[in-house]
Amino acid sequence: MKLTRLSTLLASAALAVSGAAAFAADYTLTISSWAPPTHGINAKMWPKFIEMVEEATDGKVTAELKLGLAPPQAQMDLIQDAAADASIIFHGYQPGRFITTKIIELPGYEGSAEEASVAYWRAYEKYLSEADEHRGVKVIALHTHGPAQLHSNTPVTSLDQISGLKVRIPGGVGGDVGNALGATGIQVPAPKVYETLASNAADGVVMPMESRQGFKLTEVAKNVYELPGGLYRGSFAFIMNEGTFADLPEDLQAALEENVFGEPLSREIGKIWDEIDTIGREATENADDNAINAASDSDLEQFSTIAAEVREKVLAEIAETGVEAQAAYEQIKSDLSAN
C-alpha cells in the first residue's frame, strides 16, 4: 500500500522531511525528487507542499522526501508504477509526450512565475485537461519557472552571437527557440548541466536565473544574456499516483482538493520560483567575475518576430490535439495582464 500507516514507518523516520509530523500522521506519502538536495525544489517547494498538506488534513497526512529514485525523465512512469506517491515532472524532458503544456512555455508572456502558474492552472482546468496528456496520474499542480535566459562561459551581448553556439536547451518550446536562433542544441537533464559546462561540452545553457545558485552556474557560466520575458518558460507538474489518492478517506481527499491541489499549490510553487530567481540574480550580482548583459532594443525587436513564428507553430500543434489553443492562449494572456 502506497499510503503507509505509522507503525511501518518508524524505521525510515530519519528520512522524513517533516520528522515530528511523521510520528503523528496517519498517512505518509513518499515523494520522489530528482533535483539536487539544496535546490529550491527540495529546499522550499516540497516543504511548502508538506506544510499545506499537513495543515489541510490537521496533521493526518504528511510526506517524506526521497532523492535519486529515478532520473528526471522517468518520474511520471515511476508514479504510474506506484514506486512513489508524488513527484515533480518537467514536461520538456519528454519530447512528444506532452503537447498542450507547451502553451505556457511560449516566449513573450509578461508577469511573475506566481502569476503565470495561476494562469496556467486555470487554462488547464478549462482547456488543456481535455487532451488527457497526464493519463495514469493525478495532476495536483502546474507551474512555471521564471523567464529562461542564456548563461554562457563567454560573453554574449547580441542575439546574433547565439548562432552556432552549443547550448543546452530542453525540449519543447525551448528547443524551438534554440533552433530559430541557430544554436546547436544539447539535451541533458538539469542536474548534469554543471559538469556539461565544466567539461566544455556546451558553450552555454538556457535556464531561469535561479539556476545561477541552484545549479552553481556562477562558477561555470559567468555571463548572462537577458531578455525581458526570457527565451521561454519551463513547464512543470506536481503529480500523484491515482491509487494513492483513492486510498485516502473521503474527508481527507476533500480537504486536499479544496485547500491544496490545483490553484492554491500552483500559486505557492510559482511564488517560490520567483523567490529563488531573486536569490540567483543576487548571487550573480555579488560575484565579481559574473556579468549580466541586457538585450538591446534591436535584439528585442528581432526576437519578437522569432517569438511570433514559434507561437504560431506551437498553437497549431496544440490545436491538433483537439484543444482550443488560441482561446487557451488568450485566457493566459488576459489573466496575466489583469495582475
Image (cartoon, grey):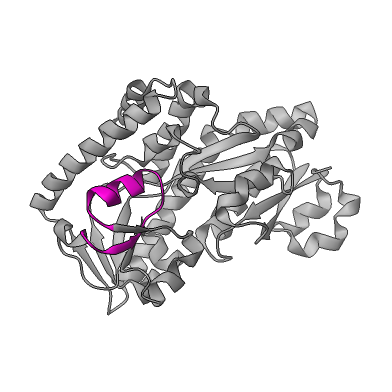
Q: Quadrant of residue 12?
A: bottom right
Q: Nearer the viewer, residue 179 or 38?
A: 179
73 vs 14, left or right, is: left
Which quadrant, please, contains the N terminus?
top right
Q: Position of residue 278 (x, y in %)?
A: 37, 59
Asked whether the viewer can see residue 230, the reply is no
**Residue 149 appears in the picture as rendered:** yes
Looking at the rendering, which quadrant does residue 334 occupy? top left
Q: Name the quarter where the C terminus is drawn.
A: top left
Comparing 31 with 181, the one in front is 181
User: Is residue 137 magenta-colored?
Assistant: no
Q: Position of residue 201 (x, y in %)?
A: 38, 71
Which residue extends farthest bottom?
288
Residue found at the very far right of the displayed protein: 7
Q: Which residues are magenta?
A: 163-183
What residue sits 63% from the left and 43% below the top?
52
- Say whether residue 323 is left or right of residue 245: left
Residue at left 17%, top 42%? Answer: 304
In which quarter of the view is residue 120 placed? top left
Q: Is residue 45 above or below residue 190?
A: above
Residue 263, compared with residue 295, is above or below; it is above
x then y, percent, for residue 200: 36, 75
Residue 63 point in image, percent of width and height = 72, 50
Residue drawn at (21%, 70%) of the image = 155
